Amino acid sequence: MTSTATEIVHLAERHPQLSGEEMLESLVPPRQFDTATFDSYRVDASYPSQEEAKQELELFASGGQPERRGGFFSRKPKAPEIKPGVYLDGGFGVGKTHLLAAIYHAVPARRKFFGSFIEYTALVGALGYKNTVDLLRGSALLCIDEFELDDPGDTMVMTRLLGELVGSGTRLAATSNTPPNALGEGRFAAQDFLREIHAMADSFRTLRIDGVDFRQRSLDGHAAVLEERAYDDALAAAGGTASDDDFDALIGQLARVHPSRYIRLIDGLSAVGLRGVRQLTDQSEALRFVAFVDRVYDAQLPIRATGTPLDDVFGAEMLAGGYRKKYLRAVSRLVASTNS
């Protein structure tokens, strides 16, 4: 029996390129949701809103046609009004992305797209607004994961884009994030969303999904951190191609590569290694790292790290600031990725 040595690469030395056409082709659910369905959604019985949301989204995906019951002469039930858009409001880790992917797979259409907010804004940046509208116009469904309200300019562009697409018959499904178990914050997030897209607010039905982060249900809540020897052994055992970067070198590289290309930055990897993790104090560096973590998590890549535990990578001041939701979501994903 022969073993294959792990090839080690450095992300700081990669210079990925991604055309607008390739970006459009990549607008599909992350691979861990390739087979996501409503039936495979893990409902937490402690939170009835999860089952209620699942049933309503099944109806949305079917176009609003309820199942007919009763005999031949029974009165046909009146179909409820189905708005062209649905917004899933709830904490991270309650299965919103799974439900969003289930909608995508359930809608029987050839032209449908699934992407994060940053992927759509990157598409506009790469192709221009008009070309993006022309490419997406007439699509049956547009799924937007993790709708961001932080940048007024990006929000305005997306609102305008969605308005044009709805006018061409496209249906929309979007998610956002709020910290779990924070009373009121979820509803405030929904209000923020509807206020920022005020021109389209009437096009969306908001569904509240309560619950706790499923990634934390079987974990102790802390990111795994390794000593140098154990770190080297873990990367050597990863197989395939693993990355090995000093944390500061990676942070510097993320400033040089557009976030839309982070997915290509980690292309072909079996694991991501980070040496000498430290707490981030610069907001721009932290936000870029969040975008990188999202791509790593979507690719289901394990992370091996030394230094500061990755659940402490964002300081208390950052966690108390305006980007709290993003940082908490990233911490949740980092805990899961370092323990995988």
Image (cartoon, grey):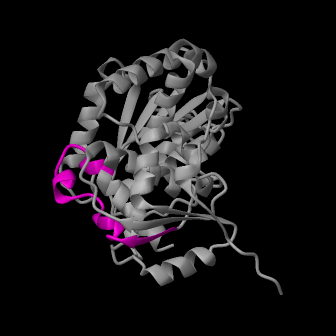
Q: Outermost residue, bottom direction?
A: 1
User: x, y percentage for residue 294?
Assistant: 46, 51
**Vertical arrangement, residue 253 with respect to residue 206, above or below:** below
Residue in the foreground of this view, choosing between 255 and 142 = 255
Q: Is residue 59 left or right of residue 147?
A: right
Name above or below for residue 128 compared with residue 184.
above
- Nearer the observer, 340 or 140: 340
**How many numbered marks have been drawn onto this rendered protein structure?**
0
The residue under the point 63% across, 59% down is 269
Q: Which residue is drawn at 57% across and 48% down?
A: 265
Residue 276, placed above or below residue 205 = below
**Which residue ends up furthest to the right in the rendered image?**
1
Residue 71 shown left or right of residue 330 in the figure: right
Say whether residue 280 is magenta: no
Rendered location of residue 70, percent (x, y): 59, 45
Q: What residue is at 45 percent from the left and 79 percent from the top? A: 228
Vertically, is 93 above or below 13? below
Taking the magenta stretch, the answer to whether it contains residue 324 is: yes
Residue 37: give x, y in percent of width and height: 60, 53
The N terminus lies in quadrant = bottom right
Q: Is residue 177 visible?
A: no
x, y percent for residue 326: 32, 49
In this orientation, which residue lies closer to the viewer: 329 or 247? 247
Tell me if residue 172 can be seen. Answer: yes
Rendering quarter of residue 45? bottom left
Q: Give the range drawn in magenta.
A: 303-326
